[in-house]
């Protein structure tokens, strides 16, 4: 078995191509349809659009995306591996669609949700054996699962009912954070936790909240409009914190505060705990307290395995919690920890395919991935053929390849904001250099400038540093390379005022380290920036319009030169600038 097509249906739909046990390519539906966490379903074979949570789905979208897969990877594979939460009828429908479009497979397989997560983490790792923690909202095989992995076998060790993903997301609703279009608050609230301090007296209630969230009758406020997905408030345990009693409001008051977000109010209690929003210190302290209790609960789950496994893999949507990841590493219990760039459901297709490859028994025992697991597995830009026409619409100059890194570094050092589109996109939710906006981390105002003038997002959300791997530990507290922004470490105290725009309010930083072999272009750009600034570090944020996923269209990136205050876009070795600022090119030439 050599070539496998991996598929994950539902939110964060993705397709993956596995050849000889290596992930060679991934396609994420959100990048093509330009909607975060885009889902493709075939639960019904009826034509037309059908409501599915926060969006509409259709067979037309499915067939369109499969046409792209066929064009890029062909239609004949040794095996098909599907993760779709165990929906048997949909699995049959999907195979029918594939047959209609001419796809052929030697065998077909369904792989369970968390098993797919675990397979991606372990079979992309350098380990021969490891403990694997997979946790998110929930899957058809559980909510939080610990696996033991060795050779080509992955074994379920413990299935825990705690819904870490849902409890964390729900915490954002209690705080009063406006959710993303698909209903999540987790990414936003993680940035807010740095502004608060855990309150000792609240911790027992927060611990109970994490552990009892799934067991209590849910407090819900539901609606399908702006956000689609149910807007949930489950305040079990934390509603009993004496200091927060004043924040209990009636269901009607809470619905009014959310305005058009809510259509219907349901629940067993007459009141619900709702704080006054991100600006409020009580809300900030509450978020920090829950984050602390959440981390404690995760570590408690791992404790029975301390000393039994040298290596740890962490995967699932909750693996994006870099604060907890850092605390786990700091324990020093595991010799090595492995993360992946796409730990959330967008990585399930690759995991399912890797599981089928290694579980077939035909490929020996897995003894490590054998190479750096590159995140640059996505498609090239979808509108590549439109670039000649776009060149006529925007001022630009062509650079010699050997000039590009030095010019990019000089522009960033001069406080220009530069978008970069190069090669294939990086999979997962973090921009890692191929679809990034780069800025000067030494400018104390740059965080606010980018938030207000380009990203159009909340004031409390931080920006990440990108640094060369061999020098990162000079400036940050990381003890290992962090190639995928998986761990939130700290800027060393002596550099916090020097690097204000990538240092969060509590001194933390969501660092990405770049080795020369991982990303030669970005590594050289950072070295060029060091010649100017004395530090091989830049501010790196995702290249996307507000509310959209990371882009994969030239037209979208170039349009931001008009719709935002973005200054430049570097497309391979062509530098585009905001119309009307062509004079800047004179200094570059």
Image (tube, rainbow, N blue to C red):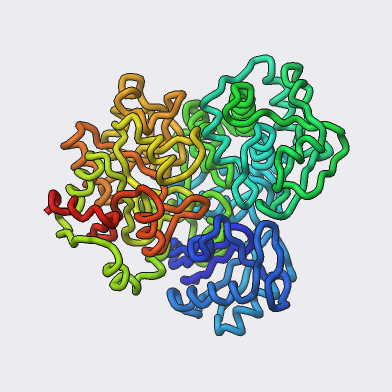
Q: Is residue 361 visible?
A: no
Q: Can residue 531 be seen in this view?
A: yes
Image coordinates of residue 6 in percent, x first then y, are 54, 66
Image coordinates of residue 184 in percent, x first then y, are 62, 45
Q: Which residue is drawn at 33% across and 57% down?
A: 421
Q: Which residue lies furthest to the front in this view?
A: 580
Q: Is residue 474 left or right of residue 176?
A: left
Q: Which of 359 and 410 is in front in this view?
A: 410
Q: Residue at x 73, y 23 (%)?
A: 205
Residue 426 vertical position relative to residue 362 in the rendered view, above or below: above
Residue 95 vertical position relative to residue 262 in the rendered view, above or below: below
Q: Nearer the viewer, residue 90 or 233?
A: 233
The quarter of the picture where residue 360 lies is: bottom right
Image coordinates of residue 71 in percent, x first then y, are 45, 78
Q: Quadrant of the C terminus?
A: bottom left
Q: In this view, does 16 lie to the left or right of 57?
A: left
Residue 573 vertical position relative to residue 319 in the rendered view, above or below: below
Image coordinates of residue 250 in percent, x first then y, are 82, 32
The quarter of the picture where residue 415 lies is: top left
Q: Which residue lies furthest to the top in this view?
A: 201
């Amino acid at each position: 078995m050599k070539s496998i097509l991996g598929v994950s249906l539902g939110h964060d739909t993705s397709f993956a191509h596995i050849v000889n046990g290596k992930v060679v390519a991934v396609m994420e539906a959100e990048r093509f349809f330009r909607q975060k966490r885009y889902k493709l379903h075939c639960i019904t074979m009826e034509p037309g659009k059908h409501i599915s949570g926060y969006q509409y789905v259709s067979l037309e979208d499915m067939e369109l995306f499969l046409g792209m897969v066929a064009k890029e990877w062909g239609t004949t594979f040794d095996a098909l591996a599907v993760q779709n939460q165990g929906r048997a009828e949909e699995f049959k429908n999907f195979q029918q669609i594939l047959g209609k479009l001419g796809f052929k497979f030697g065998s077909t397989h369904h792989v369970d949700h968390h098993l797919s997560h675990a397979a991606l983490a372990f079979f992309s790792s350098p380990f021969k054996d490891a403990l694997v923690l997979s946790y998110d909202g929930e899957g058809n095989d559980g909510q939080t699962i610990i696996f033991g992995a060795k050779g080509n076998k992955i074994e379920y060790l413990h299935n825990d009912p705690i819904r870490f993903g849902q409890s964390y997301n729900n915490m954002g609703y209690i705080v009063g954070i406006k959710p993303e279009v698909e209903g999540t608050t987790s990414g936003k609230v993680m940035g807010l936790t740095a502004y608060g301090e855990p309150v000792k007296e609240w911790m027992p209630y927060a611990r109970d909240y994490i552990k009892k969230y799934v067991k209590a009758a849910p407090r819900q406020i539901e609606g399908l409009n702006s956000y689609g997905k149910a807007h949930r408030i489950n305040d079990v345990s934390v509603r009993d914190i004496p200091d927060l009693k004043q924040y209990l409001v009636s269901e009607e008051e809470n619905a009014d505060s959310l305005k058009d977000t809510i259509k219907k109010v349901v629940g067993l209690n007459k009141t619900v705990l709702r704080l006054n929003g991100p600006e409020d210190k009580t809300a900030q302290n509450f978020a920090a307290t829950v984050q602390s209790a959440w981390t404690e609960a995760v570590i408690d789950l791992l404790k029975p395995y301390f000393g039994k496994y040298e290596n740890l893999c962490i995967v699932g949507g909750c693996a994006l919690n870099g604060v907890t990841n850092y605390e786990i590493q700091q324990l020093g219990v595991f010799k090595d920890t492995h993360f992946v760039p796409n730990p959330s459901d967008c990585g399930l297709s690759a995991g399912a395919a890797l599981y089928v490859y290694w579980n077939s028994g035909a490929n020996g025992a897995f003894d490590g991935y054998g190479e750096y697991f590159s995140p640059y597995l996505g498609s090239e830009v979808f509108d590549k053929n439109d670039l000649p026409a776009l060149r006529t619409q925007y001022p630009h100059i062509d650079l010699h390849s050997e000039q590009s890194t030095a010019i990019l570094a000089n522009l960033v050092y001069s406080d220009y904001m530069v978008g970069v589109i190069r090669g294939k996109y990086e999979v997962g939710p973090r921009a890692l250099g191929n679809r990034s906006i780069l800025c000067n981390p030494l400018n104390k105002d740059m965080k606010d400038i980018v938030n207000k003038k380009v990203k159009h997002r909340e004031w409390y959300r931080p920006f990440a540093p990108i640094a060369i791997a061999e020098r990162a530990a000079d400036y940050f507290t990381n003890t290992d390379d962090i190639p995928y922004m998986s761990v939130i470490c700290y800027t060393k105290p002596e550099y916090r005022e020097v690097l204000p725009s990538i240092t969060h309010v509590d001194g933390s930083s969501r660092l990405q380290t770049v080795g020369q072999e991982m990303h030669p272009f970005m590594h050289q750009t950072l070295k060029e920036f060091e010649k100017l600034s004395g530090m091989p570090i830049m501010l790196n944020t995702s290249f996307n319009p507000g509310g959209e996923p990371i882009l994969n269209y030239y037209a979208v990136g170039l349009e931001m030169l008009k719709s935002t205050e973005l200054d430049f876009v570097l497309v391979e070795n062509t530098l585009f600038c905001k119309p009307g600022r062509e004079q800047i090119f004179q200094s570059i030439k």
